[in-house]
Structures are given as C-alpha cells and as structure tokens.
Image (cartoon, rainbow, N blue to C red):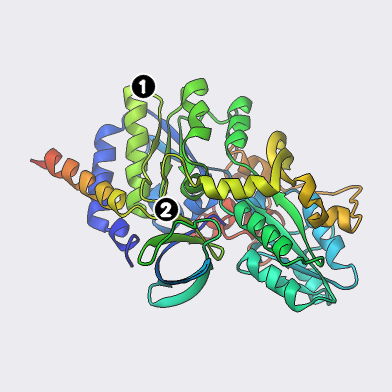
Amino acid sequence: MCLAIPAKIISIDDNIAEVEIAGVTRKVSLDLAPEAKLDDYVLVHAGFAIQVIDEEEALKTLELFKEILEHEVS
Amino acid sequence: MKFLKEYRDSKLAGEILEKIKKVSKKPAKLMEVCGTHTVSIFRHGIRDILPHNITLISGPGCPVCVTPNKHIDEAIELCRRPGVILTTFGDMMKVPGSESSLSAEKALGADIRIVYSTLDAVDIAVNNPEKEVVFFGIGFETTSPTIAAAVLRAEREGLTNFSVLGAQKLIPQAIRALLDNNETGINGFILPGHVSALIGIKPYEFIAREFSIPAVIIGFEPVDILQGILMLVKQIEEGTARVEIQYSRGVPQEGNPHAMKVLFKVFEPSDAVWRGIGTIPGTGLKLRKRYRKYDAVKKFGIEIRESREHPGCRCGEVLRGVITPLECGLYGKACLPEHPIGPCMVSVEGTCAAYYKYGKRS
C-alpha cells in the first residue's frame, strides 16, 4: 500500500509531470512535490510524486557502504 | 532501473549479511512496521538468511488490515445507495465486512470502481455529474496527502457530487500504543520508508528517547533492508538507542513539509479504531470544518449500529506481532487467499497473505 517507485520526470505541464519508469511513461501529479524539476527522479505513489530523490544521498549510501566493506576486508 | 537495480546487488547484499553475522550476538527481535517491508522481506528471502538470533516480526503497517469492519460496512451501505459510484483502491474489494464485501456487492450490481489514484476518482465525478461519487480512502501518511489533494481539487472545480469515506491512519502514535502494551519485547524498529518520506524523522524520536529502543527508517530493496538491519543490530550490540535514516535518498530529515501542509489543511487528527489494537487517540484523520461537506458519512447519513468480526479470526494478534499467522487456527485451512476470512489474508501486504504466498504453510 505504501509502495512508491522511482521515476524520472521527462516533461512538466503546469502541475502534471510525465514520468518514465522502466521504459513506461505515465502522468503524475506534482501537487505534493511542486519543487520537482525536469530530469529529477521522484518517488511516485498512487499517481502523485511524493518526494524528490536525493541523487547525492543515493550515491553516498552505496559508496559509503562499499568503502566500509572494503576497509573491513583489507 | 536507476535507484532500484543498484540496491538489488546480490554481492553487496551477501557482504552486508556477513557483516551482520559478525556483529550480531545478542537476541534481536525487530519489528517491520510497514506491510511493504513485510512483502519485500519475504520476496527476497531475508528472514531465512539472517542469523538465528535475529527475529523479524510484522507489525500493524498494512492499512487494509487495520481498517475495522465498521468502515467496510459503511462502504457497503454506501454502494447500495441509488446513484452512488463507490471508488476505492483495489485492495479493499475482497475484505470481508460483517456480512458482505465490496466485490460481492459489485457482483450483485453495485457501481464500484477501482482507481489507481484519488484524482481518478475526482475525474469520475467530473464525468458523471448526475451521480454521487464517493472515494473510500484508506492509508497512512504516504497516501493521505493524495486524498487531501483530491478534496482540494474537488473544491477548486466546484464539485458537489464528490465525497470521501475516510479511514486513514497515522503511524507514529500506533507504535507508541504497541510499546505501551509491551506484549512483544521488541528490540528494534524497521521504520516505514515511504511514510517517513512524508513525515521525516522527528515524530519517531520518542521511540529512542522514552523507550530506549533503536529505530531505523529503511528503504525497500534488499540491500537497503540488510543495511538497515545492520544499523539496528550495531545499536543493539552497543546498547544505544537512536533513530537513524538508512533510506536517506528518499527521506530528508524533515520529510515533505509541503505535502504535510496539504494533508493538515484538509484533515485534522482524531481518534481512530485499529483492528486488533482498539482506539488510539490522535491516530485518525477527520475532515476539517471547512471540508466537512465532502464527508460521505455525514452527507448520506450512514450509521452502522453493530459490526461483527469472524470469531475465529486472529488478525488482531497478528497485527500486534503477538502471534504469527501459523498460530491462527483458520490460516491456510478455512482462511486462504481465494477465500479470505481476515484482512491480513486479503491484502497483498497482509502478513498472512505474505506468509502464504512465500510458502510458510506450517
């Protein structure tokens, strides 16, 4: 029920964005995330963008973890 | 798929698992509050690969499951009214009420339509001005702002034939109620990623501060979940209690203040009855005075005198994490996905449905 999928914004018309998820496009409302911009990745839940994904944080999570693991091994 | 594939890397997952095995010594009973986590944990086989001292138990985070029969009965009563189109999310269709279900009513001719988004329900109202369109809304903080946005759109468009049967709930104080009951001896919480994307970290701080229990907001992919479990067991081993965010790409500290503003513009907190838990103050949502004209119960004068639950159904105890589905006498026998008796077997995110689908039969 609380599922939300990351999708890329490929166009915006007023408060409606067209997003792409694994090659499929659909329209979602930006009423709850008006700050979302073209090319942003957003979390889409029930036809609404509910959060803009922080790309920097996404990379940081993965990189940090890989570093910790490498450090542990060496 | 960006932001999915890299968090499904089996090599990385395996390495994190090894780290968990190395770090975790003490017994750790971790509750995943959210039904979406329950499904992801089963789908990726995470319960089966964790060391034996770590137990995962499912909590009350499936909105379909915690909706008491009264609301199902109200929806059934509404869909029987002439000229009403009842719209809802697909999960609600098969949930048994006291005497019927929405799918049984649809088979008998009621106009019930499954929608993907609340805005689809508003569109149905726009396109059917001679009908009354009711949206039967359930959900937590992830979904409730989308219901508020639909009410605001109905207001903007001047619709008089749209209303909401609301049964939404708020998560953090339900966690407090579980901890106050103290039935399960939880050592750590896997907090819901997408509820938190909206509410942020602050509403959970009481878990660490008042109950000295670690809690981590975790994403839904296997690497996320394993990394979050590692963060929890590290805290348990250190004897510390903090609320942390593993899912930082989707959950800023402050959540989504704009969406919460939309939610609380339209709704205000109220008391709510949770199936299996009872009334929890301040965990429901009711329409604010300005928006009461969109309240379907008031608009149609719905009054349910008495709702009944199946006497053998133990969904309540499953939802509190007190028993697993395997301890319910109906599970896998009289209560099956094709013939569910309790809501935990109906919803794809229900604990019983997840147990059954992923082969935990005895």
Q: Residue at x 54, y 51 (%)?
A: B35
Q: Nearer the viewer, residue B36 or B276?
A: B36
Counting labels gives 2
Quarter residue B345 falls in: bottom right
Q: Amino acid at mark 1?
A: Gly
Q: Amino acid at mark 2?
A: Phe
**Residue B19 screen position, x and y as percent:** 24, 40
Q: Nearer the viewer, residue B187 or B246?
A: B246
Q: Using residue B194 as the reference point, say whether residue B61 is left or right of it.
A: right
Query: What is the secondary structure assignment of the residue under circle 1?
Result: loop
Q: Nearer the viewer, mark 2 or mark 1?
A: 2
Marks 2 & 1 on one chain: yes
Q: Nearer the viewer, residue B176 or A55?
A: A55
| Host chain of mark 2 | B
Query: Relative to B144, is B78 above or below?
Result: below
Label 2 and label 1: CA atoms lie apart by 26 Å
User: On the image, numbered disc 1 is attached to which residue?
Assistant: B239
Query: What is the secondary structure assignment of the residue under circle 2?
Result: loop
Q: Quadrant of the N terminus of chain B?
A: bottom left
Quarter residue B316 falls in: top right
User: On the image, numbered disc 2 is attached to which residue?
Assistant: B220
Q: Residue at x 48, y 22 (%)?
A: B209
Q: Residue at x 24, y 43 (%)?
A: B18
The reply to whether residue A61 is in sight is yes
**Residue B141 screen position, x and y as percent:** 58, 48
**Residue B303 screen position, x and y as percent:** 91, 51
**Residue B123 screen position, x and y as percent:** 69, 73
- Alpha-carbon neighbours of circle 1 within 10 Å: few (<14), some, or many (≥20)? few
| Host chain of mark 1 | B
- Alpha-carbon neighbours of circle 2 within 10 Å: few (<14), some, or many (≥20)? many
The extreme left residue here reads A74
